[in-house]
Amino acid sequence: MKRAVVVVIDSMGIGAMPDACEYGDVKECNTLVNVAKANGGLCLPNLEKMGLGNLADIEGVKKVDNPSASVGILKEISKGKDTTTGHWEIAGLVLEKPFLTYPEGFPKELIDDFVKETGCGGVLGNYPASGTKIIEELASEHEKTKFPIVYTSADSVFQIACDVDVIPLETLYRWCEIARKLLDGKYNVSRVIARPYHKVDGKYQRISKDRRDYSVPPTGKTVLDAVKEQNGRVLGIGKIEDIFVKTGITHAIHTGSNKEGLEILLSALDDRFDYDKYLTDKNFSDFDKEFIFVNLVDTDMLFGHRNDAVGYGRAIEEIDSYVDKFLNLLTDDDLLIITADHGCDPTVAGTDHTREMIPVVLYSKSLKPQNLGTTDGFGRIAASVAKWLGADFGCNSDALF
C-alpha cells in the first residue's frame, strides 16, 4: 500500500519572501538560519544527512555532497503568513484574497454581538497582544469578572483565553463556536482560537492539549479530499483536523506536544496506532492508500511567538532525533516530506509570524535524491502527494518536483 507522510514543522521558515516588507517584516527574517545562529549551531545529524544544510548557511548543519533526500525551497503564492493560508496551500488550495486583520482590535459592533450571543457579560482586552503577556496582565480581572480575555495579533485570529478554573472548558469552546459564526462573512477572520489556561505553582500556564482552532472551511478542494474520495485513509495529527475543519479527513488525533505527535506518527508508521479509536468519518470503510498529515506546533506556539530562540532550537533538535526512526520504518512504497508553513523568527522584533519561504525535504527509498532548487508554490507538495498515491487532483505533470 502506498503511503505519503507530510510533517509540518510549524513556522520553520527559511528566509524572507520578496514581498515580506508588505507584511511588516524585515528582509533579515529567516527563522531556521537565525535560530541556528542564536544557539551557536544546531545538532541535526539526520536532517543534515538528508541535505537540509545545502539549502542555506545553517550554523551547525553541514552541507553534504551526497544527500539522502531531495531538498528545495518553496515560495508562497497565497496572500498571507498564517497557519491556515500555509497549510491550505500545502494541500493545493491557493488563497487569492487575504483574510482580514484587526491591528486596532475588533469593531465594537462585533464585540457587542459576541457578548449578546454568548451571554458572557463583557470582554477584557480586545487588542493585539502576546498570549502569555495578556493573560498575565488580565488574569486577575478575569477571575473577578469572569469575562473572557479576547485578543488578536498581526494574523487574522480572534483568540479567547479563559482560566479553566473560572470558566469551564466546554463554555470556552461554545463561546468560540459562536464567535466563529459571527466572524464569517464581512469580518473574514481566518481562525478563532480557544486558549485555555490555569495557574500552576502561582504561574499561569496555557494548556496546549486543550487548545482548539475554529477555522473557516476550505474554499475549494484539497489533496486531502482527493485522497479520501479515491479510497484513501487520511490521518490528521495535531491541529490538522481544526485547520481543515474535518474536511478530507477520515481519522484525527489532537496532541499536547511535539513529542506526542512524533510518537503517534512513529506508531502509525510501525502499524501500532489504534485507528478505530480516532475515526472521524463514520462512512469510512476500505482503503488502498494512506495520507498522514502532521503538524508540530511547539516551534511556533511555545518558542517562535515567545521570542525563545533557544527553546526553538531544542524543539528542532528533538524532531531531528525522530527522523532516523521514521526512515527505518519506511518502505519503497512510502514518501516522506518534511516542511513548514510560514515563519516566526524569534530573533527579530515582534512576536508575530514572518512572511517566509519554506524548506522541503523529500525522501523515498525508491526516489533518486536531487536538488529541487527554489520554486513557486507550496502546492507542489500537494501535487507530489497526489502523484505518489495515484490520486487524481488535477496536478501538473512535474509533481514530485
Image (spheres, rainbow, N blue to C red):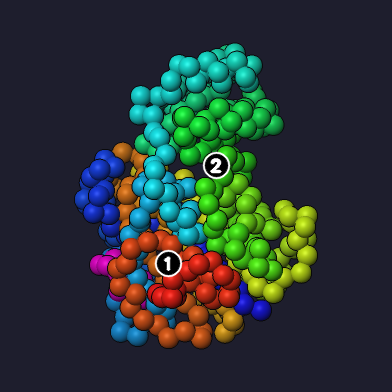
**At 29% from the left edge and 42% from the top edge, which residue is drawn?**
23
In the rendered view, does 101 fall on the left or right side of 268? left
Q: Is residue 164 above or below residue 27?
A: above
Q: Position of residue 319 (x, y in %)?
A: 49, 63
Taking the image as drawn, is residue 325 in sight?
A: no
Is 263 in the magenta? no
- Which of 394/325 is in front? 394
Number of numbered callouts drawn: 2
In the picture of the structure, the residue carrying the numbered disc 1 is 380
Instruction: State the image coordinates of residue 300 (x, y, percent, origin top left).
Output: 44, 49
Percent coordinates x, y for residue 203 in the rendering: 52, 32
Q: Does residue 217 appear in this view?
A: yes
**Magenta-drawn segment:** 49-58
Examine the rendered structure and indicate whether residue 116 appears above or below residue 277. above
In which quadrant of the rendered view does residue 118 lie?
Answer: top right
The answer to which quarter of the image holds residue 129 is top left
Q: Is residue 263 left or right of residue 86?
A: right
User: Label 1 sits on what residue type?
Assistant: Arg
User: Residue 364, image x and y in percent?
Assistant: 50, 80
Asked if 138 appears above or below 216 in the picture, the reply is above
Q: Which residue is mark 2?
A: 215
Which is more N-terminal, label 2 or label 1?
A: 2
| Magenta-colored stretch includes residue 53 | yes
Q: Residue at x 37, y 61 (%)?
A: 377
Q: Which label was assigned to residue 163?
A: none
Q: Residues within 10 Å of mark 2 (few under 14, many from 20)?
A: many
